[in-house]
Image: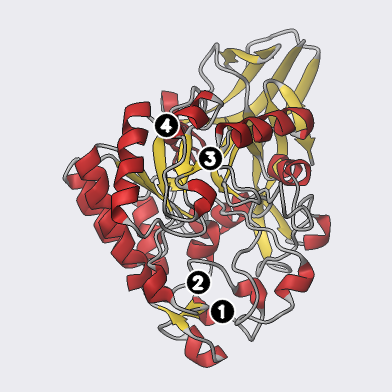
């Protein structure tokens, strides 16, 4: 089977390629990059005129909720949402019930995904048993079953000795440690940003120090253990400074920003609406500006979603009581185009790097490239198509987003996994 993608603007950071050309796919691989005038026989053709053609998007940070919380999301619905959002590979976090804290649970996720998922699924193993923070998991065993990262996502491992032990094992295994940076002793019952939103809505606040203190600690531990560290969902100007300085020192650390943290500030929270409640919270204008500049300047390496679906009844409880988190798989591309490309913070090639090539490097996988011979995971995006975000169209079970009804630009038109179209708009 041969597929020809015609007349698209091909964006491949692995080749520093940014030009209008054609891509010929044979079976599951990129066979050839062709000039627009070159002819090639194909069984199927996709006209990508006016569109970006990128290596398949990779999301390092999602919550699929299964097992244990299937009323929020399942592996099947979450991976269909990923395909609709342009993602060809995703990494589900371990905070399920039971948690992904053993080789057996990693194997279960891999097997379940193979049965129902249209996209590639790479599990993230827990750092400690039951994510209780006390005893390190069988990290080597989880790696043998397919985990390429560990994380305690949803919380930090507060015991630095335990965390250091896990980092030492991760360093030996050559896998990345994904850090949720939150000092639980500082956060208390905080629900919104402490600078403005918390007082206005009447809930306890979350200061920037809640994040920055653990970012600093984790960087120190990574330097000591030689572990590869990836800072999840960075939200503060302080995190930017700490990451920048760590890179200058030669420490092996990367950072991600979620679209909600560069697309919206705490000032935009209209009322006691828990669709605006996420962790870390929406921050100040100054923090948002720092994050945008950090993405522009390649201090922040990756854009991830932290896709966190919840049932509508749970989010109806109000900001003080509702769970943290919003969905993001089906809005990430549009928010990135609208708030970073159109505002001049990223070039299209940088967008491809931060949503595909760089995440592949963080995981250490042979993806994020359209070089000849590579697996044909490809995302096609119309960057000028305008539409209104409508949660009723989501493939995800979760409809919890503050972006419902927002007018955006940047529409995913096709998602291809191993040469096969798994989503078409």
Quadrant containing the C terminus is top right
Q: Badge 1, how many Cα within 10 Å: few under 14, some, many 20+? A: few
Dot 2 or dot 1, earlier in sequence: 1
Residue ranking furthest to the left = 249
Q: Which numbered disc, 4 or 3, marks the residue closer to the eye? A: 3
**What kind of element bears circle 4?**
helix
Relative to 321, say whether 117 is above or below: above
Q: Identify the element where label 3 is drawn.
A: strand
- Real-space Cα separation, disc 2 to disc 1, in angstroms: 9 Å
Image depth: mark 2 or mark 3 in front: 3
Residue 277 position, x and y percent, is 59, 73
Mark nearer the viewer, 3 or 1: 3
- Residue at mark 3 to residue at mark 1: CA–CA distance: 33 Å
The reply to whether the C-beta atoms of the residues labelled 2 and 1 are less than 8 Å apart is yes
Q: Is residue 45 left or right of residue 217?
A: right
- Structure colour scheme: secondary structure
Look at 36% across and 28% down and name the residue there: 174
Which residue position is annotated with label 3? 124
**Mark 2 sits on what residue?**
282
Residue 9: x %, y % from top left: 58, 32
The circle drawn on residue 361 is 4
State how far apart marks 4 and 3 are (Cα): 16 Å
Pointer 4 local density, CA inside 10 Å: few below 14, some 14–19, many at least 20: few
| C-alpha span from label 2 to label 3 | 25 Å
Residue at the disc numbered 1: 268
Residue 108 percent coordinates (x, y): 68, 33
Tell whether label 2 touches label 4 (CB within 8 Å). no
Residue at 70 percent of width and 9 percent of height: 40
- Residue 66's disc is none
Q: Quadrant of residue 50?
A: top right
Element carrying mark 1: helix
């Amino acid at each position: 089977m041969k597929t020809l993608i015609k007349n698209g603007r091909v964006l491949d950071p692995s080749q520093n390629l940014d030009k209008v050309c054609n891509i010929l796919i044979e079976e599951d691989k990129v066979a050839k990059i062709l000039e627009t005038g070159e002819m090639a026989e194909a069984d199927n053709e996709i006209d990508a005129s006016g569109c970006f053609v990128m290596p398949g998007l990779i999301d390092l940070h999602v919550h699929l909720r299964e097992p244990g919380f299937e009323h929020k999301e399942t592996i099947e619905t979450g991976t269909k949402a990923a395909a609709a959002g342009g993602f060809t590979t995703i990494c589900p976090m371990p905070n399920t019930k039971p948690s992904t804290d053993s080789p057996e649970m990693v194997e279960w996720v891999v097997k379940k995904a193979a049965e129902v998922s249209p996209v590639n699924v790479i599990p993230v193993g827990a750092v400690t048993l039951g994510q209780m923070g006390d005893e390190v998991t069988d990290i080597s065993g989880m790696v043998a079953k397919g985990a390429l990262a560990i994380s305690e996502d949803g919380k930090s491992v507060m015991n630095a000795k335990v965390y250091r032990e896990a980092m030492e094992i991760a360093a030996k295994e050559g896998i990345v440690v994904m850090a949720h940076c939150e000092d639980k002793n500082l956060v208390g019952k905080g629900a919104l940003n402490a600078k403005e939103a918390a007082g206005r809505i009447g809930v306890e606040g979350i200061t920037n120090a809640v994040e920055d203190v653990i970012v600093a600690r984790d960087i120190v531990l990574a330097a000591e253990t030689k572990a590869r560290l990836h800072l999840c969902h960075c939200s503060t100007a302080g995190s930017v400074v700490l990451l920048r300085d760590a890179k200058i020192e030669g420490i092996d650390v990367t950072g991600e920003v979620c679209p909600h943290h560069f697309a919206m500030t705490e000032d935009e929270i209209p009322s006691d609406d828990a669709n605006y409640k996420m962790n870390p919270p929406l921050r100040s204008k100054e923090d948002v500006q720092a994050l945008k500049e950090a993405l522009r300047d390649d201090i922040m390496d990756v854009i991830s979603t932290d896709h966190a679906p919840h049932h509508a009844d749970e989010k109806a409880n109000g900001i003080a009581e509702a769970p943290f988190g919003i969905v993001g798989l089906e809005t990430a591309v549009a928010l990135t185009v609208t708030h970073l490309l159109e505002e001049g913070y990223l070039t299209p090639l940088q967008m491809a790097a931060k949503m595909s090539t760089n995440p592949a490097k963080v995981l250490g996988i042979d993806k994020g490239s359209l070089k000849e011979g590579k697996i044909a995971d490809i995302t096609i995006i119309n960057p000028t198509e305008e539409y209104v975000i409508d949660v009723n169209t989501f493939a995800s079970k979760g409809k919890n987003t503050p972006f419902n009804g927002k007018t955006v630009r940047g529409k995913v038109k096709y998602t291809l996994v191993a040469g096969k179209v798994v989503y078409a708009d």
